[in-house]
Image (tube, coloured by chain):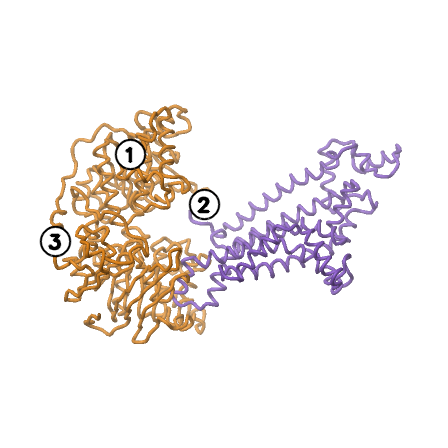
Chain colours: A purple, B orange
Amino acid sequence: MQITWFLARRFSAMIAVMFLVSVGIFSLIHLSPGNPIDILLGPVPRTPETVATLNERYHLDEPLYIQYWIWLTNALQGDFGTSIRTSLPVSQEIADRLPTTLALGIYAFIITVVGGATLGVLAGLRQGTNIDRVAVITAVAGMSIPSFVVGVLFLYLFAIVMPWFPTSGSGQGFIGSLWHLTLPSLSLALICGAYITRHVRAAYGRILGEDYLVFARARGVPSMRIFVTYLTKNAMIPIVTISGIVLSMLITGAVLIEVTFSISGIGQLLVQSARYQDIPMLQAVALFMATMVMLINLTTDLLYSFIDPRIRLGDGS
Amino acid sequence: MTYAVEDGSLLLSVKGLTVSRRGDKGLQSIVKDVDLTLSEGETIGIVGESGSGKSVTAQSLIGLAPKALTVGGNIEYKGSNISSISEKRIRSLRGSDLSMILQDPFTILNPLMRAGRIIVESLSDGGKRLSREHRRALAVERLKEVGIHDESVIDQYPFQLSGGMRQRLAIAAALASDPTILIADEPSTALDVTTQRETMSLIKQLQVERGMGLILITHDLRVAFNMCDRIYVMYAGSVIEHAPADQFEEAPMHPYTHGLLRSEPPIARRVKELVSVPGTVPTPGEVTVGCVFASRCRWVTPECVEISPPLLDLGENHASACIRISEIAGEIRQVELEAADAEPGVNSERPEPLVSVKEVGKEFRASRGNMKVAVDRVDLEVGAGECVGLVGESGSGKTTLARMIAGLEEPSNGSILIDGIEASNWRSVGKAARRQLRSTLQVVFQDPYSTLNPQLRIGTVLKESVLVHNPGIRDVRAKVEQLLDRVGLSSSIADQRPSSLSGGMRQRVAIARALSAEPKFLIFDEPVSALDVSVQAQILNLIRNLNRDVGVGFLFITHDLAVVRQVTDYLYVMKLGRVVEQGYTEDVLTDPRENYTKHLLDSVPRKSGWLSAART
């Protein structure tokens, strides 16, 4: 019972936030400096005909709330209008670039979680040892160096000094993509992995000191079982929380990395669109990113309640 | 030195157990040269206050001392040495040979695991060879053994169970692989008195049925008397006396044990002055040569500080680490008699009410729309200069009521009148009245560790408080010194930070801070329950003297009936949000009318018959 209630609350909260975000994104066209018509015209010469076409297309002579409604219903059906820069449908452009960005994100997330968590677990279990010190220093370094700096450094080291990896592009086929995306994913993963390492280390360290762990050992529960069902399962609770935040960081971080490595993904699209004041494209990308972040948060909450019975069943107090 | 074991074969024999920590000042020993023995079916108690090293001793026996500590000495289990075997081998002994339960039932169970699984995983092979139904049946059976007959419990998570149930579940888990020795580290300290007695009875009963060896670690001598065959008393890392339990009760043979016994406030009568042991427990490694108790002992001689006293055999299995014991035994007995002086309780007319609580209730929103009644139409009065007690177990609503009186919580209904000001809603009374209320009423909380800002020196804390309530004061410093003096602290304390003070000293500072407002009314919320017995008596004496000398009205909240008897004039007993009995403390505790009050009184550890009464 409590779980459905919990989900319903979270979901309606997400809808409410999405509404506010979409209003903000829609307003972009009116908030940007200059006349909406001029912006939408882009390089096309201003004639009464073109203006009339645009007015009809974007319903610019209607009241704002009707404009918003039309824009929203279209957006929900995947129609974000035409890109000013390329004059192609916006949805088409996004669909073309999405696989690359997704590949980059997933690749980076895997490196982040596998690398960051492994280091975090090792450090957490052996706090105060050399492994721990190395992990902590790596984490601090990872968090303090911006990803584009790391990107440039990696490019210099592993693409120019030692030309193992390509300097740009996203490659063809699975192997090609993997080869092209390794350096960008690594750069992206370093900073996010650092957060994971720190949190995993803290979570394991804290749980190691918990009474229930001592009690489990005192009654002879095998150490492998203690590691899995006591340490790891309890540590998952804070780790899931931070994973959500890290995934959101990956999405925003991808923008810088795609530009650094000249990868034609969503992030690069965002930068190009911003430069051209390609408002329909910007709106679509922004809404897409916002939706992603919110879906990640919702998933985090779901996982959370799945792991922790106190949330699922409601703490008595 | 060896002591004859009377009956049963020897299970555990510990010789020269030493636990030390590498600190800033070199090696500090937390446990020093401890010898103990345990036979089949025997119960031994290790009794001591905080810092005595009793818990570390217990953990060392089962190879679970924190990694930062170095354990030395010889531990023999059934004749073979287990002190130097590998972690892997000692692990194979845990659960099936040696098992342990810990103090806090709220933290010792994996919060993500259902009760049934907690029991099954504790079986010797983790229950792997059994079928699903068989495992379930076994879990149900194990729960029945610890007195949980409700089968649905096995599908519940720990957070859904009460403290007493959790401790029972923990006991079932600890005993799942039928250990030969059970170590129980303060198993009932975190529980209410009634639950405490039930839990102890259960442990005792299981120990007898199974013929286990039981090692009980406790700070409470009265509990140890009821549970144990033999008792070891530890102080600052050393065993300073051990003897059969009945001999201990009759004739303690060490000044510390003697002091500890007498510091226990009696439940049966109000005494003129509670006996306390002056000073505080030395920190580990502080005393390297000489008797560890010398600095607090009234019989100390120069010789005591020069020679580390060995445990002297006094015959009949009684040993004491006091080199003067043969000289002073008679004198100790004499002091015993002096302390027994009783004082009649107050039952004169109650003074004019200073605080008057009428029909006050508090409801909390529990899960979805359901309201939980924490306090249910309570009437309570505290007169000027009167000391009123409020007792109840956890969940009785006593703390919620106190918080409402202190303005920290808003009552759902009813009225609270404090010194003529209607104070049921502090937000609506206006600024001037609110300020007046704040200085009329002050609170002293349970935990002196968390109510003092660790960054501020004691002098600053008090100065700040004085200036808040009396901004125009001319000589703040003198006022601070006067406050410190009133709570029995020297003015040099003002330059120290809370971390360098003992728990008792911190609680004195907290009281001084409350007095700085020159209040007419003080609320004490469990002011001594976080303190050791020997220190508790010091603070109780202080509170009594303050009430007598300063003429402030007190509301004294506690779960401890013996404490309330020593301090208060009038008493309210709360249960599940209601006041079930009230009257002069002396009358209520001598001749309780309500069954609940009788039950509470009955649950207080006493000389004999404490455990047997719980089983019926």
Q: Amino acid at mark 1?
A: Asp
Q: Can residue A103 be spotted in the picture?
A: no
Q: Can residue B60 be spotted in the picture?
A: yes
Q: Amino acid at mark 3?
A: Arg
Residue B61 in the image: x percent, y percent?
33, 66
Disc 2 target residue: B367
**Mark 2 to mark 3 CA distance (whole Å):** 58 Å
Q: Are marks 2 and 1 on the same chain?
A: yes
Q: Mark 3–mark 1 contact, CB under 8 Å?
A: no
Residue B127 appears left or right of A55: left
Return the chain for callout 1.
B
| Count of numbered circles on the image | 3
Q: Quadrant of residue B384?
A: top left
- B526 over A262 or under it: above or below: above
The front one of A241 and B364 is A241
The front one of A198 and A103 is A198
Residue B296 in the image: x percent, y percent?
23, 50
**Which sits earlier in the primary sequence, circle 2 or circle 1?**
2
Disc 3 target residue: B333
The label nearer to you, 2 versus 3, is 3
The front one of A105 and A23 is A105
Disc 1 target residue: B379
Return the chain for callout 3.
B
The front one of B524 and B160 is B524
Q: Quadrant of residue B78?
A: bottom left
Return the chain for callout 2.
B
Q: Secondary structure at mark 2?
A: loop
Q: Quadrant of residue B342?
A: top left
Q: Secondary structure at mark 1?
A: strand
The 10 Å Cα crowd at callout 3, few under 14, some 14 to 19, many 20 or more, is some
**Which sits earlier in the primary sequence, circle 3 or circle 1?**
3
